[in-house]
Amino acid sequence: MAEYSPMMQRYLETKEQYKDCILFYRLGDFYEMFFDDAILVARELEITLTGKDCGQEEKAPMAGVPHHAADMYIAKLVNKGYKVAICEQLEDPKNTKGIVKRGVIRVVTPGTVVDSNMLEERKNNYIMAIFKTGIYYGISVCDISTGEFYSAEIKDNNNFPMLLDEIARYTPSELIVNYMMSDCTEEINKIKERFENLYITKLDDKHFSNKLENLALRFSILDNNSKPIENLEERQLAINSINALVEYIEETQKTTLDHINKIVIYQISRYMALDINARRNLEITEKLRDKSKKGTLLWVLDKTSTSMGGRCLRRWLNDPLVDVVEINKRLDAVKELKDDVILRGDIVDNLKKVYDIERLAGKMAYGNANARDMVTLKNSLLKLPEVKRVLTNTKSKLLQELANNLDELQDIYQLIDGAIIDDPPMTIKDGGIIKLGYDEEIDTLKTAQTEGKNWLVQLELEEREKTGIKNLKIGFNKVFGYFIEVTKSYLSQVPERFVRKQTLANAERYITEELKNLENQILGAEEKVVGLEYDAFVKIRDEISKNIKRLQKTSEVISNLDVLTSFAEVAEDMNYCMPEVNSSGTINIKNGRHPVIEKILGAGTFVENDTYLDKQENRVSIITGPNMAGKSTYMRQVALIALMAQVGSFVPAQNAQIGVVDKIFTRVGASDDLSMGQSTFMVEMMEVATILKEATNNSLVILDEIGRGTSTYDRFINCLGSCRIHSRQRKMWSKNTICNTLS
């Protein structure tokens, strides 16, 4: 059998290194796929499948996409759960004899997308690494587009449910797991079942190293309170997962991403625990039925002006606080913004003109920002001094902190403003992006270009006068360069010094020695100035990249301010009250309303109601009534109001006292798991048993129709088995309490 052609051999060598990827192989103006990749891509993208001679008897299956439109096709494949390796030409084909050198410049996976066209503006795109050893887990999470990096350890008695809760907290698009985690088939299947379209990559255990030296040198490793962590060696599970995730990111992106410079190793107990069922049943960020935003708590509270603020609001809703002091700092800031209409209006007016500084900083560090991105960044920075001025006289502690931490970044503004024209082209390699006055050499060459055009106009007038040819004109095209064009009716007047260059149907084109000299000067200047402008742009981008930490700090301030302002806007529009948040363990809500239903129905339509729960005689409330009476609505309303208060938002009520809740559990709806041999009743009982096992003295539990079809007494006796086991450790509802209440 004949060998493959040299080009195809190179392709196969590259494909061997990226077996789990679809290889986009650059050939001229197209990215081509061959063999199985071509068949798969033709099917998934609905493009034509052709063939290519490859040195064998049969042609190799081939499919291709234009290189200028590749991002669109890559996005479709990644959204379908595929990894794409981009193999680019590393040499200029014009200056290369033989096969052009090629290499993979980037691997695009669901969790490593950085192109803004492939990302949701108001949602983070996280990739998560899970390191499992025994019954414990180390997790790390990163959004490459923003540089956020978090890590934690799960070392408790009920670790896998806690892992599911952390996955639900971040909803990553890709998981990286070690062999032990991958070999736990039951756990992996549950993860796949709970999180659809989640791409899972298994990495060799050697990637999950326990080395600390490089991490400590490259990253600021902080705790929940932004303080450096001492005794890092004690966070070994977190370190294993961090090392794997950092290595995976660098291997796929083929570069060191400087904007990922801070890692926060957090304590899970810092935030309210929301299990996966609670997040789903309360519809906090997406609807249970169609995954949409409309009809969720996020939809109600999101009046943010920036994409950064939108992502920050989503994070806050996923991470309600349990620290009373921090919660009240947020509430005080919201109160000041709500009460001061002028202050709030000034902030909103300025924030509406601020673009996504967070992701623009990432693009600068990544090296794919263009001149338009710089102008967008400049226009955003223009508004920062006014925002800082507006915040200067605020009184609440949190707003004062934001004012003090807001870096106006006017040195970066001045750099961009002095260098980049206001309306630059999309590409950065064709020139036309640097302002006059920024670089002397570029100015000189641009002057030569301008003067050269004047010289051409003058030469055209002189030649008309010398030859008497009235319609003589000087033109240009990329093939022949500059030329003198004369129509055939004047050919008899053409002088001998004109050298014929091209014949057309109705004219002849000529060149002269003087025109040739001008051409060399003009085209030489144009070619050189393009290169100089590109070099100048790259230097400006590199200079901005040195200030990534400042840009990130400013984007954090702006996003926090945006969310607080959004809370104030919603509170004003929907007549919400400021809750009293404390550690009393009491929930006392007067004239409460369901935030989502109220917004859908309109103000004044929802019937207000009260709630009182404490840790003594009013620990349990049992709600009865006919179908469609609003029982489920009422229960969810209490949970949402508690969550809103601990996020720092005002709440839909006349007044509310919220004793901090450490966990919210829900058991809502009927479902079975027949594939695992579990009936509806068994699923319900297992979920309730888990709740009773995990709930603490400060937890809020919502149980909606437990044990349907089973006698009242039996269903509670069955589900309270674990309660008796843990009653010594935690204050729980006893069997007698439940039965007496029911009777």
Image (tube, rainbow, N blue to C red):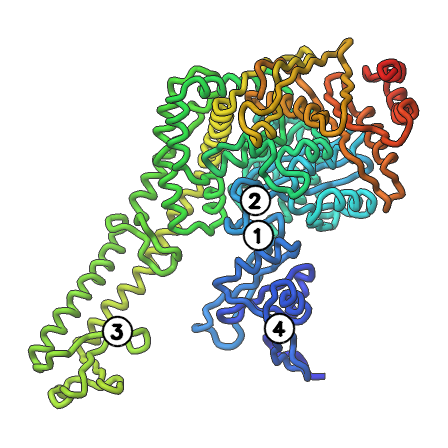
In the picture of the structure, the residue carrying the numbered disc 3 is 476
Query: Does the residue at mark 4 contact the one at mark 3 (Cβ under 8 Å)?
Result: no
Q: Amino acid at mark 1?
A: Gln
Give whichever of discs 2 and 1 has the lower sequence position: 2
Local SS, label 1? helix
User: Residue 49 got which mark?
Assistant: 4
Foreground mark, 4 or 3, reads: 4
Question: How far from the left and from the top, in percent, is residue 639?
Answer: 67, 24
* Quadrant assignment, res 404: top left
Q: Earlier in the sequence, mark 2 or mark 4?
A: 4
Tell me the amino acid under the disc marked 3: Phe
Residue at 54% x, 20% y is 576
Q: Residues within 10 Å of mark 4 (few under 14, many from 20)?
A: some
Give me the residue at 16% from left, 65% from top.
Answer: 454
- The C terminus: image quadrant: top right
Left or right: where 314 falls relative to 185: left
User: At which x and y percent is residue 242?
Assistant: 66, 40
Q: Position of residue 191 (x, y in %)?
A: 75, 43
Instruction: Kindly state the secondary structure of the residue where label 3 is placed.
Output: strand
